[in-house]
Image: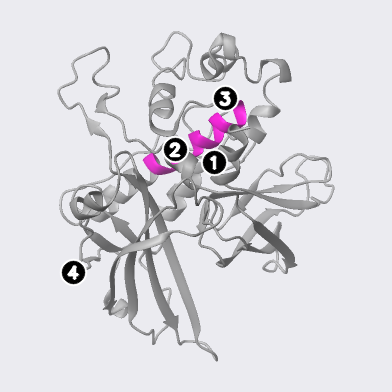
Amino acid sequence: MTYNSMKITLPAEHLWEPEAGGSLSDWWDAHAGLPRGKFGTLRRFTPPLNARLGEPSSASEYLFKAQLMNYEGIRAMYEAYTRNKIYNATGVVQWMLNNAYPSNVWHLYDYYLIGGGGYYASRKALQPIHMVLSYVDGSVALVSNDYHKHFGANPAPLSAEWIVYRLPSAADAGTSGPQVIAIGGPEYFDVSAFSHNTVVFMEQKIDFATINSQLGINETYLVRLVFTIEDRSGPAPMKREEDNWYWLSTTMDIVNWAYDGPDPNLWTDCTQWANFSSLAQSLGAASLAVNFTSKPPPAGSDKALYEVTVTNTGPTIAFFVQLAAYAPSGLEIGPSFWDDNYITLLPGQSTTLVLATLAMEDYTNAPVVLDKIEAVSYNDIVAAAKH
């Protein structure tokens, strides 16, 4: 669950009990899987989280880092399938969509109808056209996931590129943006020839070995894949840009394929966990401006729609920004579905998203009132943990 969902699930005094193991306390276990089963606790999720991202000191820090891990894992599952679907992948099963009980396992959106990192990772990975990075060999693919044309009858060529960013040192965190250390592209593709089975590759791969040689031990870096296309079907050309961010380290996961411990059919251990701890030192405080306006929904719709513009007004990158919509009561509005969430913005970058909520409450038939929208970045979470 997200922190907002967990806050209304557990009593405040049991939200985070360090002496009871924090995320491994009995109160948290009550919101995992079947107590007598294999997933009745977070004992397989928490140790990798601690090793990869640093041990949390609060429920808010743990649950935000959990969204980052969920996003990374769920996106990789769908991307691996779509990238290989025309070669040797026949399908994928996601267990599961949602829970009938407030739970920290097995959902894309939770009991309160709030989408977490896994939900928005799924949306990202299954876009009509999507750019995918291979963790194995650094190749970058353009994947078509749909049967329909989304770019008009006369689209301009699609322009694709990738950029690798080195994050600032701890001394420069908060005062400077990321440094570009490698670029691939732009390369151009004829999107009018794309079908639902199209997978095409950029000629230029990302050379992990070369990048690692330029960086320090356990240093985290970011990769942005971005494509741009111009839709010429309307009265005025419209430029569309889609990006996909990855976080990598010079120390990455090494899977223990020879694992023969308990339950080898349920999970696989690693002999080495990826080390993203430098994120905590490299990300300065983010400065974000959020503005929203209502927009008319389609005729007959039961939804309320809002156009939300998020701008990074600071000098540092705003990493993994979670957006949440709140009612006047202070509770997060559920369901609330964004066309994208957990976004990353470069200094000065702005993006416009669409938020959909119900127009009227299901049971009371009272209007759903949007009071405010908050943006919380990974920068904010690690900064709070330092104090």
Q: Earlier in the sequence, mark 1 or mark 2?
A: 2
Q: Indicate the amino acid at tag 1.
A: Gly
Which residue does the image show at 21% across and 58% down from the upper left? 139
Give whichever of discs 2 and 3 has the lower sequence position.
Answer: 3
| Numbered disc total | 4
Which amino acid type is marked by label 4? Glu
Q: Position of residue 249 (x, y in %)?
A: 32, 43
- Kindly identify which numbered label has been placed on residue 203: 4
Magenta region: which residues?
Answer: 58-73
Q: Is residue 318 magenta?
A: no
Question: Which kind of residue does numbered mark 3 sit on?
Answer: Ser
Residue 359 visible from this viewpoint: yes
Residue 57 circle label:
3
Quick one: label 1 or label 3, which is nearer the N terminus? 3
Q: Rounded to the nearest whole Å, what is the CA distance between mark 2 and mark 3?
A: 19 Å
Distance (Cα) linking label 1 and label 4: 34 Å
Q: Which tag, 1 or 4, sits closer to the chain's start? A: 1
Label 1: element kind: loop
Quarter of the figure that contains the C terminus: top right
CB-based contact (under 8 Å), mark 1 and mark 3: no
The tag on residue 116 is 1
What's the CA distance linking mark 1 and mark 2?
8 Å
